[in-house]
Image (tube, rainbow, N blue to C red):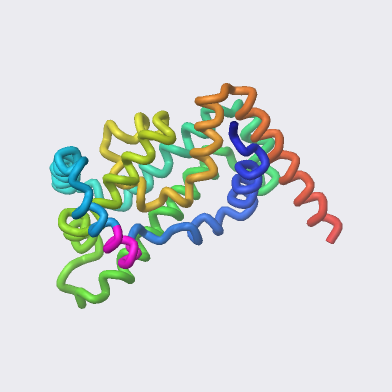
Amino acid sequence: MADIENIAQRLCNIIDSPDTVTGFINGGLSVPLDYGYLIYGIFDTDTRYERETERIRIAAAIRKDILNYDNIVNAAKQTFELFNRYLTEAEQDKIYRPVASSILGRVFTNTIASAIAKRVIERTSFTFVVFKGKLNPITGLSTLLLFGGLAERAIRTSDKLKAEAPEIYELLRPRDYDLLYFLFADAVQPFVDAIHAGYSEGKPMFNQIINKVNEKLNVKHMVGSYE
């Protein structure tokens, strides 16, 4: 059973303050975490064949230039667009307009997707300053994704997405965007949870979450108007 209150609160926080979404981004470049995944992969012999197959897919995706700004934007944007498809235009207006003037939900979520991609690139650039100009950030990220714990992280995050939110996995998989998901998973998680609630428990459950979001946003902005 979906935790309506929890999902609604996290959605409310992001919709009300879109800039906070970048705070969830670690760029997939947490070195201790990557070492942990690398070690885990070494000792996990049961899924070695499957992971090697996925590494081949990663290499092919990198050759197709998957690790660029536009693809990161598009990967994040697809998730937000699926969320919006669960909403009527009237419902989108009701949620977004109090916090985003009169812009459409599509524009609002595109802006968040762009902010996510920008933050990923910024964190990548910061991390790869160690290369002192020998490699640009995306080249460095590609190198680690091919040979380091980052690949394990990408693969296992994709596997987890397939198991826990198959509708999102199926959305991202055709263009190998599931391999990028680890870069921004935390930033889109409330939207994914809402989508999965609607997918697995029905549209009424999704509607309950959206109604709760509306309640929270209305209360928040009513209080703000009196301050």
Q: Quadrant of the C terminus?
A: bottom right
Q: Is residue 64 visible?
A: no
Q: Main secondary structure of the magenta part?
A: helix
The residue shown at (65%, 31%) is 91
The front one of 55 and 214 is: 55
In the rendered image, residue 124, in percent from the top left (x then y), is placed at 31, 64
Which residue is farthest right?
Answer: 226
Q: Any magenta on residue 31?
A: yes
Q: Is residue 45 visible?
A: yes
In the rendered image, residue 134, in percent from the top left (x then y), is placed at 15, 72
The residue shown at (29%, 49%) is 154
Left or right of residue 147, residue 222 in this image = right
Q: Total number of numbered labels?
A: 0
The residue shown at (72%, 46%) is 217
In the rendered image, residue 212, in percent from the top left (x then y), is placed at 71, 38
Vertically, is 130 above or below 19? below
The front one of 150 and 137 is: 150
Vertically, is 91 above or below 119? above
Left or right of residue 36, residue 168 in this image = right
Q: Quadrant of the N terminus?
A: top right
Left or right of residue 53, residue 194 in this image = right
Q: Which residues are magenta?
A: 29-36
Which quadrant of the figure has residue 155?
top left
Vertically, is 203 above or below 209? above
In the rendered image, residue 32, in percent from the top left (x then y), is placed at 32, 67
The residue shown at (18%, 48%) is 62
